[in-house]
Image: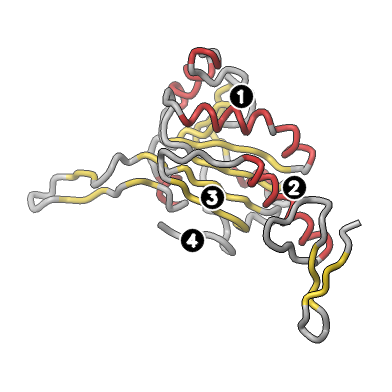
Amino acid sequence: MSVLVGKKAPSFNAQAILNGGEFEKNFSLDQFVGKKHVLFFFYPKDFTFVCPTELHAFQAALGEFESRNCAVVACSTDTEQSHWGWLQMPKNQGGIKGITYPIVADTTKTISMNYGVLAGEYEFDDNDNMGASGPMIAYRGLFLIDKNGIVQHQIVNNFPLGRNVNEALRMLDALQYFEENGEVCPANWQKGELAMKESHQGVADYLSVS
């Protein structure tokens, strides 16, 4: 598992499904560099149980992310055809119909590997036969990437543990506030609350956000 915070987000070109059903052959996060922040998250599998709750939760909050000029992009190791099929299935049947943000198909598993969220690794036995030490699907990784393409925040959850979309929004707010004001955000900080600025004496002074 790698730590990408402070580093350039790994670049890729891959198949993706856009707007709930459009196939894109060469989707890349590079299109957002210099233009938008990106919330890029991985989920383990299509047609599962926890995963659709997360995808729908991000969709429900999509307007909040877009109002902050932040793109939301999902990714799993399933094929683009699998993504498309799941997108045609209604929510009350376990599907993700209604999801409009891009869903990337990491069929080569290289994106998950480069982001350090691939569960397992390839290995060879004494006869040079290739095998895998794990399920070779993505953990629930989440990466907040700034406009310069630098990862500013990441979390990685194991398969059973769904993420908190409100926390992702909170981290985006904190990052953008710091970028705009140069003031750092303390524990449990929420948009509209007090921030902190280091004084000349090195003492943290609380300042009003307003």
Label 1 sits on residue = 99
**Regarding mark 4 in the picture, which secondary structure is present there?**
loop
Density class for disc 4 (Cα within 10 Å; few <14, some 14-19, many ≥20) is few
Find residue 190 and report its horizontal and vertical position in percent.
75, 52
First reached walking from the N terminus: tag 3 or tag 2: 3
Density class for disc 2 (Cα within 10 Å; few <14, some 14-19, many ≥20) is some
- The residues tagged by marks 2 and 4 sit, at their Cα atoms, a distance apart of 24 Å
Amino acid, disc 3 = Ser
Label 4 sits on residue = 3
**Regarding mark 3 in the picture, which secondary structure is present there?**
loop
- The residues tagged by marks 3 and 2 sit, at their Cα atoms, a distance apart of 16 Å
Amino acid, disc 4 = Val
**Regarding mark 2 in the picture, which secondary structure is present there?**
loop
Density class for disc 3 (Cα within 10 Å; few <14, some 14-19, many ≥20) is few
Residue visible at 79% across and 38% down in the picture: 67
**Regarding mark 1 in the picture, which secondary structure is present there?**
loop
Residue visible at 50% across and 38% down in the picture: 162
First reached walking from the N terminus: tag 1 or tag 4: 4
First reached walking from the N terminus: tag 4 or tag 3: 4
Label 3 sits on residue = 11
Amino acid, disc 1 = Ile
- The residues tagged by marks 1 and 4 sit, at their Cα atoms, a distance apart of 29 Å
Task: Check the picture and name the quadrant holding the C terminus.
Answer: bottom right
- The residues tagged by marks 4 and 3 sit, at their Cα atoms, a distance apart of 16 Å
